[in-house]
Image: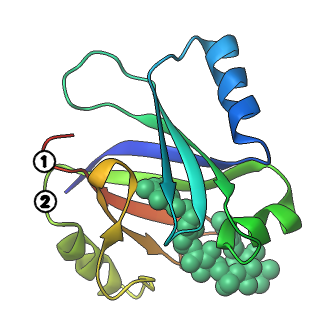
């Protein structure tokens, strides 16, 4: 089951400056930085639920690491802004969730889940099949 919003992905030109904006403006302090070379992004996950009940949501700030990154292409076309939304599974297998959605005619972009932030398993649905929204499915790492 998809049970929560895991994160909202926001593309930006200057990751460090954007992180500072989010910290200063909203008071978010729990920041996790990571580079994902496969996805061509440097990212920062800002935790926005600090209840510690394991159901956190995040703002994911992303900036491209290389010119041929999908995010570089997107930024060039659209400028900074919301790039994708991500729904989290309740621990269920992300591939099983994707298979169920694909059965309804939505294109799933990967044959098998790939590595996402903080050890998660992720896949994406094509924005053209989701009313214009690039949609990610996330199965968080067991220990996350
Ligand atoms: C492209 N389009 C979008 C879009 N990106 N629409 C809404 N939101 C987006 N983010 C539209 C675009 O305007 C075109 O529409 C059409 O889709 C085809 O786009 P394109 O520019 O030709 O680009 P493609 O086809 O080369 O690539 C688009 C896809 C690509 C979605 C296939 O971006 C992709 O594979 N994304 C998944 C991976 C990703 O985004 N990784 C970065 C985040 P018109 O103009 O033809 O109408 S990594 C991440 O989130 C991680 C690591 C994590 O959470 O842990
Ligand atoms: Co994401």
Pinpoint residue 71: horizontal percent, then vertical percent: 69, 65
* In the image: residue 140, left or right of residue 22: left
Mark 2–mark 1 CB contact (< 8 Å) = no
Mark carried by residue 114 = none
Q: Residue at x 71, y 69 (%)?
A: 66
Q: Is 29 above or below relative to 4? A: above
Pinpoint residue 48: horizontal percent, then vertical percent: 45, 24
Sequence-wise, which precedes: disc 2 or disc 1?
Answer: 2
* In the image: residue 21, left or right of residue 98: right
The crowding category of the residue bearing disc 1, from other C-alpha atoms within 10 Å (few below 14, some 14 to 19, many at least 20), is few
Q: Which quarter shows the C terminus?
A: top left
Q: CA distance from mark 2 to mark 1?
A: 11 Å
Pinpoint residue 105: horizontal percent, then vertical percent: 40, 88
Q: Is 54 above or below relative to 103? A: above
Residue carrying label 2: 92
* In the image: residue 22, left or right of residue 130: right
Q: Is 125 above or below relative to 84? A: below
Find numbered disc 1 in the image and state the secondary structure of the residue it sits on: loop
């Amino acid at each position: 089951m998809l049970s929560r919003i895991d994160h909202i992905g926001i593309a930006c030109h200057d990751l460090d400056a954007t992180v500072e904006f989010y910290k200063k403006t909203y008071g978010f302090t729990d920041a996790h930085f990571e580079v994902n070379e496969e996805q061509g992004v440097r990212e920062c996950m800002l935790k926005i639920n600090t209840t510690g009940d394991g159901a956190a949501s995040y703002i994911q700030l992303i900036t491209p690491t290389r010119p041929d990154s999908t995010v570089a292409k997107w930024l060039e076309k659209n400028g900074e802004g919301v790039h994708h939304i991500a729904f989290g599974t309740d621990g269920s297998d992300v591939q099983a969730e994707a298979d169920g959605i694909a059965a309804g005619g939505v294109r799933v972009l990967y044959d098998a889940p790939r590595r996402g932030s903080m050890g998660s398993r992720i896949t994406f649905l094509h924005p053209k099949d989701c009313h214009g929204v690039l949609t990610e499915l996330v199965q968080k790492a067991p220990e996350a």
